[in-house]
Image (tube, rainbow, N blue to C red):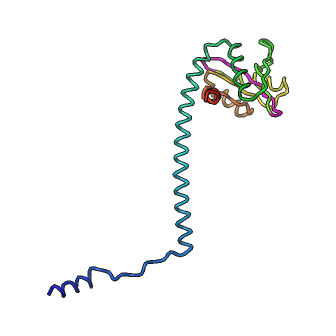
Amino acid sequence: MADIFSSIKNCFFESPSLPPKTETQAEKNTRHQREALAFVKHKHREAHAKNMQQEVWHRQYGKQKAAELSQLSGAEFEEFLAGLFRQHGFHVELTPTTGDYGADLLLSKIGQRIAVQAKCYTGSVGVSAVQEALAGMAYYGCQNAWVVTTGNLTPNAIELAKKSHVRLVDTTELGKLIQQLET
């Protein structure tokens, strides 16, 4: 009797064993591409998360350094920037304290000249800083203009800088430059 039930059970409940299905080359390629894409997406998410963490850290570090730097006078801040850019491999010229035509520093590196307008502020830095950097670039025959500040940039300053290709070095970017030399 047990044999009969066993036979019936095998007929209805257990499927006959089929030979294992072999993957075609096209299926293997498709599976490989899916796995590779998933891996790349995962690594991209990891890298993005790490970049965001670093950006937050640099922003906080830059604000801390900017708070320290904002205690300097304008001339002391310019001297500090001159030393910072020299350590980053630039040849640096300081312009006269008055009558500087909009550039506080002139940077040179690999045939490029950059007019730098330095603003050691705790408040907002507006359009006039970008305009001064552009004037310094024209007067001193530079190819680029930068505004370096310890303050906050107004939306109008940011807009004008974008339109006129002036690089804005804010507290985050300044913090990155300082931190690179400390490590």
Q: Quadrant of residue 165?
A: top right
Q: Position of residue 91 (x, y in %)?
A: 79, 26
Q: Position of residue 174 (x, y in %)?
A: 64, 26
Residues drawn in magenta:
110-124
Query: Residue reaching furthest left?
Result: 1
> Which residue is painted at 60% across and 21% down in the image?
66
Q: Position of residue 20 (x, y in %)?
A: 43, 78
In the visual, does 81 lie left or right of 7?
Answer: right
Q: Quadrant of residue 100?
A: top right
* Foreground residue among 30 and 2: 2
Q: Is residue 114 magenta?
A: yes
161 is higher (above) or lower (below) than 27: above
Q: Quadrant location of the C terminus? A: top right
* Foreground residue among 41 and 158: 41
Helix, strand or loop for the magenta stretch, by majority: strand
Q: Quadrant location of the N terminus? A: bottom left
Q: Is residue 58 magenta?
A: no
